[in-house]
Image (cartoon, grey):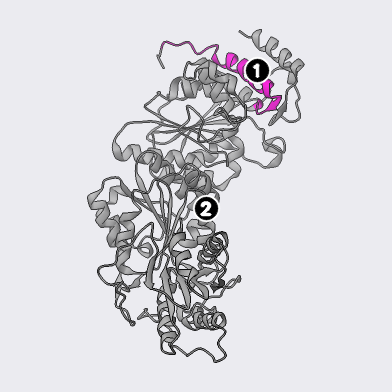
Amino acid sequence: MTVRQAPYETALKPYGKALVDLAERRADIVCLSADLTRQTETDLFRDRFPERFFNAGMAEANLMGMAAGMARAGLIPYVNTFAVFCTRRPFDQVAMSIAYPCSKVRIVGFMPGLSSPGGPSHQAIDDLALMRVLPNMTVIDIADAGETAQVVEAIADIDGPVYLRLKRGEIPVIFGPSYRFSLDRAAVVRPGGDVVVCASGMMLTPALKASDAAASVSINVGVVYVPVIKPIDAGTVIQAAAAAKGVVTAENHSIIGGLGSAVAEVLAEAGVATKLRRVGVEDRFATAGSRPYLFREYGLSSGRILERIWELMGCDTPPPSVNEVETETGGAFEPV
Amino acid sequence: MPPTIDLTDVPTKARITAVELVGSVGLGYLGQVLSSAELMTATLGDLVRPYTDRFILSPAHYVTAVYAVGAELGLLDRKELIHYGIDGAALETIGSERTPLVDFTCGSLAQGLSVGIGYALADRLAGTGARTAVFASDGEMEEGQTWEAALFAAHHRLDTITVVLDCNNSQVDGAVSMVTTVEPVSAKWEAFGWEAVEVDGHDLEAVLGALHVDRGGKPLIIVGRSDPTAGLNAIAGLDDAHFITLGPDLVNELIVELKGRL
């Protein structure tokens, strides 16, 4: 697989553009917003297809119920708001009106994990866990601007609800043009490895950087990109882990309930006797702050991944120091 | 439903059926059928055109009323009723995804109107001309989602939506009026931009008439004032009308009294 080198080029609003493209081809695609239209890139949809765009206002319980009704009537609603407001806040409505009836609603949650500077009210550190526990729900946490367009189309016809979490604004272009997103298969980005890092979403690039840094001191670290958290590609995870001395998971989310838990379940049930370390938000609420500060402070970093690799390898010497991956050019405080 | 069908005796017959059904299990949501029989008869017998319109049952524990009225109207095969409340059967005592006759049922309360709005928006987009009927209960007005949905429906002038609200003043902890003040009900909905019509929920002609008022381009709510004992002496003054224990003697008393009304 072709992976570009940091610093990555970025693309702007790849989701909003992809949704418009999909709607150009399909009349059954509708778009719902909740007073966060520009922030979810759906101003593009609103301006192109006003008759298929519905703004629920700040009323997420009603938002989810409306989407459920539209899906039952044969439409395919893409529901867009911040990740905290489409998972925590209307959880019962998502569970009972969408997941239980297996409605074809696509819930798109923006500002995942600590990518929001807005503090705990805006930081979705539990959205993957909340959505993963719901029967029928597909859960996806992607990394790359180019794959965004592929995902928007790939989820359209899944016969059930989908939760897709997306970073806002500038999205790095990580993969080469030959990359194909798969709903079924995790991507082995760096094969083999004394230790394997399973990463999703915004933690893919720190994982790649950690792998590069380890290679500089002759430690081979495999990287498996797992964008689909549920249903997880157990086969690829098991195959990669079985040959390694240890596994590290890396996610922009609590270490409880998301990718780390999903990988732990897979390995334990398969009897893969490999040690596991989970990199993510360590069971605590964060604070307001810039994205680079929060990722550094709460351990969403190449450095933390390397520390865990070194633990698993039983190395006596400290890991090499790394400069953390930066993709944002701005960094201005913009909670909404 | 052919317009010629006489609905007059449907509510009383449905109540008899419901007493038999709930009696067969020994306990259950009978008060809801007793309070809503006329409202449900008008909803299924007049408002909702089979295979054309949408019917959403927001309080899923009212589903026995759907079975009982549905059987009287010929919408549900009466033979199916023997499966009521049997483990593994589709006729569950609280509505579910398997429930016949309803397009969407919502056991977690107050979710129905939002789903109805979704249907109405989809039907408006497709130009189907379908109506959306949402059956709801007064206790659901305690949930915030009700008012989120009420705001949205009025703002978008979704005049294909009709809410039939059973105001039986009964919830788990007792009278709704004791738990909280939801009154003035009609004035609240009117203030949210709805057309509201107050009726005696046990006056079938009044309920049927209310369904056809000029709604002025607005969503319509029928506020049906009702009694979860339906004036039956056998259960007069019942403390807990929300969930009734029903032994064989009480079943017989209720059926005798109800048959006297036919």
Residue B182 drawn at (x, y percent): 62, 40
Q: Which residue is at the front of the view, A81 or A222?
A: A222
* Residue under numbered circle 1: B20
Chain letter for mark 1, please: B
* Element type where label 1 sits in the image: helix
B12 sits to left or right of A40: right
Instruction: Please check the rendered image and state whether residue B6 is part of the magenta-colored stretch, yes or no.
Output: yes
Q: In this view, does A81 lie above or below A158?
A: below
Picture quadrant of residue B24: top right
Q: Of all residues shown, which one is farthest toward the left?
A: A25
Find out whether the residues at labels 2 and 1 contact each other: C-beta distance under 8 Å: no
Q: Is residue A334 visible?
A: no
Q: Can residue A155 be seen in this view?
A: yes
Q: Which residue is at the front of the view, B6 or B218?
A: B6
Q: What residue type is labelled 2?
A: Pro
- Residue at x 44% of width, y 77% of height: A193
Picture quadrant of residue B173: top right
